Amino acid sequence: MREAAGGVGGDSTESVVGAVCAVAREYGHGERLRVTHDIGADQVSRRTQAPFGSATDPGGSLPHEGFVEIASTPAVEVTVYPDGDAAIDVDGVEFRDVPREQAPAFLRAVYDGSAYVHRKVFPPQLWLVVPLPDGTAHRELVLPLVTTPWLRGRARPTPGTSG
């Protein structure tokens, strides 16, 4: 599996799931992986084009959705959709519509310590920010009830404050 610029060599669901698993293993989480694959329009969670009761899309293709659960700190779940995007949940903070070719780089940023929590004083808010090597960054609001020890440990003070 070839990886270029933090992405995945090939855009299939299988290659993205394999690359995500490889990153998890690289950071010592290989023993705590759970991977499932749903194949067919009657199995995937997004059934945008297939008629009811059909396993294939109108063009005859079988949509393939992959799910990776990594029981680590932080807990991570990655759902790779056949539409070309992924949903990545990091300790209860869900990032939707991540381009699936960015999923391995996203996971690497979480595990290598690049991801951080941005704290805003007024109005009081926390944002989980995951910067990627290509210069893009994904940001999601951290709800107060979701704040975990891992998220609190990634908090950066707002510039101009003492914490």
Image: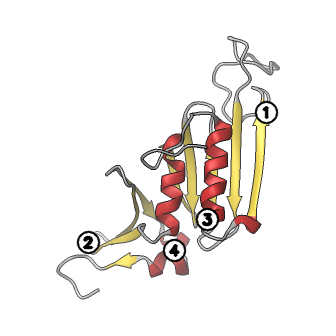
Nearer the camera: disc 2 or disc 4: 4
- The residue that label 3 is drawn on is 26
Q: Which mark is residue 43?
A: 1
**Neighbours of disc 2 within 10 Å: few (<14), some (14-19), many (20+):** few
Q: Amino acid at mark 4?
A: Thr
- Determine the CA span between mark 1 and mark 3: 31 Å
Q: Is residue 40 visible in the rendered structure shown here?
A: yes
The residue positioned 77% from the left and 41% from the top of the image is 37
Give percent across and percent down for residue 142: 46, 65
Which residue corresponds to mark 4?
Answer: 147
Considering the numbered disc 4 on the image, is that residue within a helix, a strand or a loop? loop
Specify which label sits upstream in the sequence, 1 or 3. 3
Q: Work out whether mark 2 precedes mark 4 in sequence or the reverse, and give the earlier one.
A: 2
Mark 4 → mark 3, Cα distance in angstroms: 26 Å
Picture quarter containing residue 65? Answer: top right
Single out the mark in the foreground, 1 or 4. Answer: 1
* Label of residue 122 in the image: 2
Q: CA distance from mark 2 to mark 4?
A: 18 Å
